[in-house]
């Protein structure tokens, strides 16, 4: 069990866990998940951390097939600018290792933004807190349990 799955169980949120054999040599953890689970990559989302100019860490959940638009994230968060967070700071704040950072059950509650492309989908897949472990749930459930805001933060 991971903190992400513990949280979903505790709040009785509807979700499904999917696991696969993680290859440490995989170039992209998210694309590896989509490929090994036979999923449409547009439904698999990666969890990225960015830091504002004031050092506030922000969580961005975007499709693995695209990238994070840093300017759009800054605008959504109401800050001047953001850059990708230091990996060590991301791991400390979330309690997860890189490649397995889940938007759910993080050690510190960070402001979270989910790309708008998640909203029309029946369900999305995000890391369940460990490489090789994904959780499938409705985007609205993800937003509810991360206090997230939907915004156009992904680049396709």
Image (cartoon, rainbow, N blue to C red):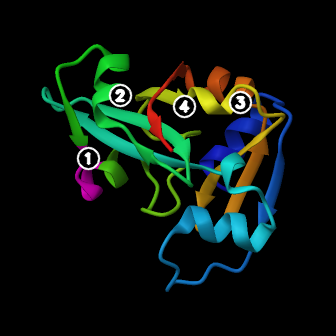
Q: Tell whether position 85 is magenta.
A: yes
Mark sitting on residue 85: 1
Q: CA distance from mark 1 to mark 2?
A: 13 Å
Q: Nearer the viewer, mark 1 or mark 2?
A: 2
Whether residue 22 is visible = yes
Q: Is residue 76 above or below residue 107?
A: above
What residue would you read off at disc 2? 73
Q: Residue at x 75, y 27 (%)?
A: 120
Q: Is residue 121 above or below residue 76?
A: below
Part of the protein shown in magenta: 84-89
Callout 2–callout 4 Cβ contact below 8 Å: no
Q: CA distance from mark 4 to mark 1?
A: 18 Å
Total number of numbered labels? 4
**Could you say where residue 155 lies in the image, as x and y percent from the top left?**
45, 41
**Mark sitting earlier along the chain (4/1):** 1
Q: Is residue 73 above or below residue 84?
A: above
Q: CA distance from mark 2 to mark 3?
A: 18 Å
**Mark sitting earlier along the chain (2/3):** 2
Residue at the farthest front position: 156
Where is the N terminus found, in terms of image quarters? bottom right
Mark sitting on residue 151: none
- Secondary structure under tag 1 reads loop
**Could you say where residue 52 lies in the image, as x and y percent from the top left?**
21, 30
- Secondary structure under tag 3 reads helix
- Secondary structure under tag 2 reads helix
Mark sitting on residue 139: 3
Q: CA distance from mark 4 to mark 3?
A: 10 Å
Q: Residues within 10 Å of mark 3 (few under 14, many from 20)?
A: many
């Amino acid at each position: 069990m991971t903190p992400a799955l513990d949280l979903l169980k505790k709040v009785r949120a509807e979700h499904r866990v999917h696991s696969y054999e993680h290859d440490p040599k995989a170039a992209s953890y998210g694309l590896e998940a989509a490929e090994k689970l036979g999923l449409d990559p547009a439904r698999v989302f990666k969890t990225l951390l960015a830091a504002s100019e004031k050092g506030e860490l922000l969580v961005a959940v975007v499709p693995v097939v695209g990238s994070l638009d840093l300017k759009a994230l800054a605008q959504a968060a109401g800050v001047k600018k953001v850059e990708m967070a230091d990996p060590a700071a991301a791991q400390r704040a979330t309690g997860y290792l890189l490649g397995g950072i889940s938007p759910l059950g993080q050690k510190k509650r960070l402001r979270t933004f989910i790309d708008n492309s998640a909203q029309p989908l029946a369900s999305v897949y995000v890391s369940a807190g460990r490489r090789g472990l994904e959780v499938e749930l409705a985007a609205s459930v993800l937003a509810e349990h991360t206090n997230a805001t939907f915004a156009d933060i992904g680049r396709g």
